[in-house]
Image (cartoon, rainbow, N blue to C red):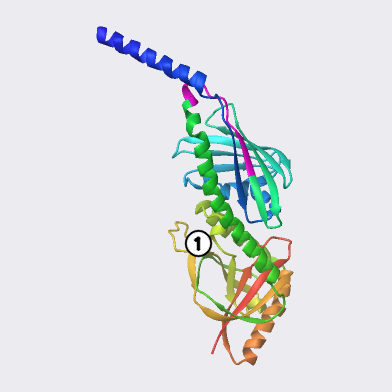
Amino acid sequence: MRIFKILAVIIILLGGAYAASMYYFVDESKNFTIEKEIDYPVDKVFAQFNNLQNFTRWNNFFTSSPSIDIDYYTPYEGQGSAISYVDPKNDTDGEMFIRYENPNKTLKYQLFEDKNENPTLVDVKFKPVSAEKTKIIWYVHTPKLAVWKRVENFWTEDRFAENINKSMVNLKNSLGNKVEKDNRMAAIKYDSLMVENEEDKLLLGINVSTSNKKDALYKNIVMNYNKVYNFVTMDLGKRDDEFGYPILITDADNYKDKEVSYFLGIPLSKKIGVSDNNFNFRSINPSQNYVIYYKGNYEGRIRAIQQLIQKAKKDEMRFGDIRQTFIERPMDGQEVNVKLSLSVYK
């Protein structure tokens, strides 16, 4: 019995010493600043921070866990936008808000973690170093911690810095893909016939037969694109930068038919298990293609397809399917931006 009393006294003394040291020598909250530079213009960088859907696709806090589930709330972008998240595997949850926005200059975030009523405050400033380089400065103020929890402040800054380092790698990759895409878009020559060699691709998509009446075909394409896109992003958990432009494959001259059959798919890097029988994989073999880029209403693509077929016949080439690669996602009531490719061979 006496031993237990001695142990209790020792525990109380140690607890008291710990509490005293935490109270007198460890701050109840932390303030620190982290600076990074990235080789992209400020408007491109800012758009990755003020749009929370973009933000969660590269920020390591969200991308590092495959089990995290995120809900986005309107307006989705800028001041007033918000998300909530739950990560059952790591037993964490929280909410994040953008409380203030000065476009291309400043953002103020609030992050509430694990039912903590006191938020972490993060102010982010963006300073153009040059036309193609931006400095990003994080000013972080952590919430006040009770004496017993203040030991966490010893590693808070290191943990935050490690997350930023990993996030910056993701951000550079994401912006690199976007800038490359913008450069390709700017270099497109519309309505000019070209010859290209296409590499093999693996598409996950859907087989469709539908009416070719006025507007009916395009409305059907938009509907089925949304089905495939939602399946790939929501059911399979793929991000936009993990797959390519949607491709529609159909007979070259079926635009004249009353009913059209087509396959509409999204390129993926490898085959994965798919439980929904509505979707299937289709391989595209390497081929030589006659190509025209076309922008306008969907009906207008017919003239471009006819040019490709006439060119193949003139060159005494046999031809196969026509592939329509949507450079911009098909949307109801809007013009299309497509690459039309006719596979040809002797």
Residue 23, relative to residue 261: is it above or below?
above
Q: Is residue 156 left or right of residue 104?
A: left
Q: Nearer the viewer, residue 80 or 130?
A: 130
Residue found 26% across the figure and 7% down from its top: 2
In magenta stretch: residue 143:
yes
Q: Nearer the viewer, residue 320 or 96?
A: 96
Residue found 61% across the figure and 44% down from its top: 35
Q: Is residue 213 visible?
A: no
Describe the element under mark 1 as helix, strand or loop.
Answer: loop
Q: Nearer the viewer, residue 287 or 173?
A: 173
**Which percent across, then down, holds residue 171?**
58, 52
Residue 88, relative to residue 294: is it above or below?
above
Q: How many marks?
A: 1
Work out which quarter of the rendered image holds the C terminus and state it. bottom right
Work out which quarter of the rendered image holds the N terminus and state it. top left
- Identify the residue at the far top of this view: 2
Q: For the residue carrying disc 1, how many other residues have a C-alpha within 10 Å: few (<14), some (14-19), or many (20+)?
A: some
In magenta stretch: residue 241:
no
**Which percent across, then down, holds residue 317?**
58, 89
Q: Is residue 299 left or right of residue 231?
A: right
- Which amino acid is tagged 1? Phe
Q: Quadrant of residue 257?
A: bottom right
Q: Nearer the viewer, residue 37 or 255?
A: 37
Q: Quadrant of residue 252?
A: bottom right
Residue found 51% across the figure and 24% down from its top: 26
**Which percent across, then down, holds residue 75?**
70, 43
Query: Magenta residues?
Result: 137-150
Q: Is residue 331 visible?
A: yes
Question: Which residue does the numbered mark 1 point to in the structure image?
Answer: 279
